[in-house]
Amino acid sequence: LAKTTQPISMDSYEGQEVNITCSHNNIATNDYITWYQQFPSQGPRFIIQGYKTKVTNEVASLFIPADRKSSTLSLPRVSLSDTAVYYCLVGGTDDKIIFGKGTRLHILP
Amino acid sequence: DTEVTQTPKHLVMGMTNKKSLKCEQHMGHRAMYWYKQKAKKPPELMFVYSYEKLSINESVPSRFSPECPNSSLLNLHLHALQPEDSALYLCASSQFGDPPYTFGSGTRLTVV
């Protein structure tokens, strides 16, 4: 199982771009990298998933270097409503998906 | 329908009670999961069902009993719980056991 390491917390200001990096040194060949957002007392919400290079959707971008040992979630122009815990998960089919400690993102006005 | 629905949203039960949590999805997903989440901690995996069969039990105490009656429904039967079992219980599903996973909004359980 690929263990993930993220910063425990981050602060940023409204309108800024926020980049959260996740380290996963023992990622396996068939593992995907998936990011989730969680608000208090709610279930995690899927943000973005990738395997290599760059993936972009309407809310975020995911950058994965060639060695895949890390990944960076990029949130453009954050707002107060982006204050949440962000989890990076690594795994493939039929894996036991284990959550790391996540990153508590606090957006300031 | 792209949701995982969990009921009830909130549950308060005594230590001698028997109750059940319900999880339902109609996305045709063949893998379903139960997670437990304590305050300010990440979700912890409890059980995994694959094609309606229990494939992973993370050494969960027997007072938690999962059941998968069909491919759309997942139950968690609770009996003789302890106050430390109070937590947010999350259900998730995935298409064939591969990411991404769709999570429900959870059941907030309080054991008194």
Image: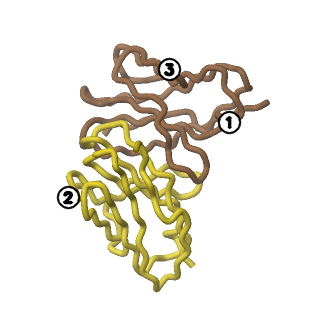
Chain colours: A brown, B yellow
Kind of element beneath mark 2:
strand
Looking at the image, residue A13 sits to the left or right of residue B83; the answer is right
Indicate whether A91 appears above or below A42: above
Marks 1 and 2, how far apart at CA: 39 Å
Instruction: Check chain identity for marks 1 and 2: say if they share one.
Output: no
Q: According to the image, label 1 marks what residue?
A: A81
Chain to which mark 2 belongs: B
The one of B30 and B80 positioned closer to us in this rendering: B30
Kind of element beneath mark 1:
helix
Image coordinates for residue A81, horizontal then vertical, percent: 68, 36
| Residue A61, label in figure | 3
Circles 3 and 2: CB atoms closer than 8 Å: no
Of the residues shown, which amino acid type is indicated by label 2? Lys
Marks 3 and 2, how far apart at CA: 36 Å
Circles 3 and 1: CB atoms closer than 8 Å: no
Of the residues shown, which amino acid type is indicated by label 3? Ser
Residue A24, by quadrant, is top left
Residue A33, by quadrant, is top left
Kind of element beneath mark 3:
strand
Taking the spot 25% from the left edge, 29% from the top edge, the residue there is A30
Of the residues shown, which amino acid type is indicated by label 1? Ser
Q: How many marks?
A: 3
Taking the spot 76% from the left edge, 32% from the top edge, the residue there is A108
Instruction: Judge the density around disc 3: few (<14), some (14-19), many (≥20) Cα neighbours within 10 Å.
Output: many
Residue furthest to the bottom in view is B16
Instruction: Check chain identity for marks 3 and 2: say if they share one.
Output: no
Q: According to the image, label 2 marks what residue?
A: B53
Image coordinates for residue A35, horizontal then vertical, percent: 46, 33
Circles 1 and 2: CB atoms closer than 8 Å: no
